[in-house]
């Protein structure tokens, strides 16, 4: 009678206040350099230490350069933040994977690939894309810095229980449609706030037939429709992915854990507060045209007309299209673009590089396009080289950079100039997200690759 | 101790845009500080200032007529990034209350953890506040946390708002979750023993 979410949530309730507020136990806390310094400062002010240091992992990823990581970070303010994380980790005895460490990378890429993220866990991080880890059958969600401090101090946070939603995608995806397209399609239907207040479980044929990395991409984007988090019931795909990873249980304990994790699914008669159904056949390669991730459409469609927008939203809609330099009602195919970004916690994994390389193989990057090709972690980078994808990319005119969040939020030097168009595999097309005035078009790795070689928005199916 | 909040009467600053994300509230390039101070200066930075740092005269915070402790914004305020810097920017600028018809979850928690009260009103009530503010920039709102009411003093209309009793108590008394959690440590240890 229980949902997957309820099974894990209920097991982590330490206490319930009379008004229903829950004191929730947290199995794992990930810390990066941007949202943790004030939390550590708060601990010191209160004279506290991390309560369970073995449950905390610190990785700098947001501010770091994607070239010359062996040299000191040029921006002194970024350097200070990265150094502060290293010092806080050292002072309090926390695991820390700094620059050039083989386990450095984007925290949401490293967690799953090292096996730190496991089914049945509660996982938090001061980062909204923590929802990524839910793909492995965990309850994972983003929190603020005050809550990072709470978790450091007590391994608990105070939460009201979210409502539950199940999004089922049945049927078979058409060729050329990726997990990113599935997520952008769902968000375009749900809108940017349509799942606020809910924790989402993804289910259906498409999910069951997807790889672990595709699931990570789908769960990653849950926050973009406002959801507290997204999750997928663990199955053979999950266990095969996790087995023998560095921090995964081993031997007899592995068997015991797999048996336990195998009970993590929504019971057939479990009730959700909301159920949504989509058909895989309706999903096309997607692209965004506006300034929030809900403003997406099939790549061959036209931007919605002003008349289709409700009255209260028209000022925002016009502001958004003005910012993008687009006109309501027009198609976007064939529009010239300036930058391409492959990477981020959404699309910075090996399968994304395989997809991108498969499309650009034997072709050439368009001369006017600047491409930033950024692996999500050193483990991904190593795999790219092991598979020879770096040579395919190089022959096509693409240079591999060093891992980090990079142009997804442009806290480092990887900034798109004002007015320029970037086709980006990242997660947010907000105004200024990739640099002040930058115009972001979100897409999957295949659409990004097609744009990189043609220099304009192109249906990747024409090139496959 | 956070600043306590009880009853606030103030003119409001209207921002009738929807889906105002935390990247607009405080852009990423201003997140590099290691303290909580100074974020108010860069609140709505890229709407408030031009590329050269010149104030944009059309933006509500620069128009000179709208001042006060209450920010009123369109639906889905605070979406996107979990950055608590957004709440620090709002409190740093001097707002104590944010009113909208709908808030993003993480922002709402972050606001309350910094002594800022998010008040959810109906879309109709929100439209009425925007109309009153447009007519009269000095029009005031009264937000009464103990009574859980918000009143548009221009029209005399009131609306009840929801807040969970635990959070309400924290805001009224200037307490935060850590203060509470630290008193509950024995339960945490008992939980760990039981779930080992």
Image (cartoon, coloured by chain):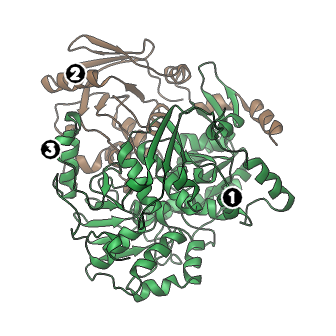
Chain colours: A green, B brown
Contact between marks 3 and 1 (CB within 8 A): the answer is: no
Residue where numbered disc 3 is placed: B57
Q: Foreground mark, 3 or 1?
A: 1
Callouts 3 and 2 in the same chain: yes
Residue lying at 36% horizontally and 68% vertically, measured from the top left? A447
Who's the residue at 72% across and 44% down the image?
A51
- Report the quarter where the N terminus of chain A lies: top right
The percent coordinates of residue A131 (x first, y second) are 54, 49
**Image location (x, y in percent) of residue A463:** 34, 77
Image quadrant occupied by the C terminus of chain A: bottom left
In the depicted structure, whether residue A59 falls above or below residue B4: below
Q: Give the mark toward the camera: 3 or 2.
A: 2
- Chain of the residue under label 2: B
Q: How far apart, in angstroms, are the residues tagged by discs 3 and 1?
A: 59 Å
On the image, numbered disc 1 is attached to which residue?
A236
Label 2 crowding class (10 Å Cα cut-off): few <14, some 14-19, many 20+? Answer: some
Would residue A181 be found to the left or right of residue A306 on screen? Answer: right
C-alpha span from label 1 to label 2: 55 Å
Q: Residue at x 77, y 47 (%)?
A: A260
Disc 3 to disc 2, C-alpha distance: 25 Å
Mark 2, residue position: B128
Is any atom of residue B104 visible in this view?
yes
Task: Write down the chain letter for disc 1.
Answer: A
């Amino acid at each position: 009678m229980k949902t997957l979410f309820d099974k894990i949530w209920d097991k982590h309730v330490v206490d319930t206040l009379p008004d229903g507020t829950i004191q929730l136990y947290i199995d794992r806390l990930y810390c990066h350099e941007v949202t943790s310094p004030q939390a550590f400062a708060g601990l010191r002010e209160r004279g506290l230490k991390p309560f369970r240091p073995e449950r905390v992992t610190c990785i700098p990823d947001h501010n770091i350069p994607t070239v010359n990581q062996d040299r000191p970070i040029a921006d002194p303010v970024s350097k200070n933040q990265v150094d502060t994380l290293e010092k806080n980790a050292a002072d309090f005895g926390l695991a820390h994977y700094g620059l050039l460490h083989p386990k450095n990378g984007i925290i949401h890429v490293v967690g799953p690939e090292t096996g730190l993220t496991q089914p049945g866990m509660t996982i938090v991080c001061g980062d909204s894309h923590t929802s990524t880890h839910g793909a492995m059958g965990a309850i994972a969600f983003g929190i603020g810095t005050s809550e990072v401090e709470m978790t450091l101090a007590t391994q608990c946070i105070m939460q009201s229980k979210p409502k539950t939603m199940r999004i089922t995608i049945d049927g078979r995806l058409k060729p050329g449609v990726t997990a990113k397209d599935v997520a952008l399609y769902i968000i375009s239907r749900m809108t940017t706030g349509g799942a606020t207040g809910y924790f989402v479980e993804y289910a259906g044929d498409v999910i069951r037939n997807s790889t672990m990395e595709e699931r990570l991409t789908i769960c990653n984007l849950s926050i973009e429709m406002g959801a507290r988090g997204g999750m997928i019931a663990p199955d053979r795909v999950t266990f095969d992915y996790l087995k023998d990873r560095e921090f995964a249980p081993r031997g007899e304990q592995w068997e015991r854990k797999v048996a336990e994790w195998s009970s993590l699914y929504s019971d057939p008669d479990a009730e959700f507060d909301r159920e949504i159904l989509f058909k895989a056949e309706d999903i096309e390669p997607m692209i965004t045209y506006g300034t929030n991730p809900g403003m997406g459409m099939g790549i061959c469609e036209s931007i919605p007309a002003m008349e289709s927008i409700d009255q209260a939203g028209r000022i925002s809609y016009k502001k958004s299209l003005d910012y993008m330099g687009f006109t309501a009602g027009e198609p976007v195919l064939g529009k010239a673009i300036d930058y391409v970004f492959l990477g981020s916690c959404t699309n910075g994994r090996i399968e994304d590089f395989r997809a991108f390389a498969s499309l650009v193989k034997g072709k050439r990057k368009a001369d006017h396009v600047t491409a930033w090709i950024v692996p999500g972690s050193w483990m991904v980078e190593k795999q790219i080289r092991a598979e020879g994808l770096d040579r395919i990319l190089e022959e096509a005119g693409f240079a591999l950079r060093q891992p980090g969040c990079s142009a997804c939020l442009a806290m480092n030097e990887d900034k798109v100039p004002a007015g320029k168009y970037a086709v980006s595999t990242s997660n947010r097309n907000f105004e200024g997200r990739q640099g002040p005035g930058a115009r972001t078009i979100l897409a999957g790795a295949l659409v990004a690759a097609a744009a990189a070689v043609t220099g304009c928005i192109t249906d990747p199916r024409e090139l496959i | 101790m956070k600043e306590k909040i009880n009853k606030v009467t103030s003119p409001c600053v209207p921002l009738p845009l929807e889906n105002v994300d935390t990247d607009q509230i405080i852009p990423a390039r201003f997140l590099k500080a290691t303290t909580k101070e100074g974020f108010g200066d860069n609140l709505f930075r890229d709407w408030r200032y031009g590329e050269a740092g010149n104030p944009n005269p059309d933006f509500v915070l620069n128009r000179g007529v709208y001042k006060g402790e209450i920010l009123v914004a369109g639906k889905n305020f605070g979406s996107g990034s979990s950055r608590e810097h957004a709440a620090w920017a709002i409190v740093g600028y001097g707002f104590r209350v944010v009113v909208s018809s709908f808030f993003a979850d993480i922002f709402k928690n972050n606001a309350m953890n910094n002594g800022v009260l998010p008040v959810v009103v109906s879309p109709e009530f929100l439209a009425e506040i925007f109309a009153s503010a447009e007519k009269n920039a000095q029009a005031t709102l009264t937000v009464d946390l103990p009574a859980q009411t918000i009143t548009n003093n221009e029209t005399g209309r009131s609306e009840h708002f929801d807040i969970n009793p635990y959070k309400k108590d924290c805001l009224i008394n200037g307490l935060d979750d850590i203060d509470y959690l630290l008193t509950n440590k024995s339960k945490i240890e008992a939980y760990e023993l039981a779930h080992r």
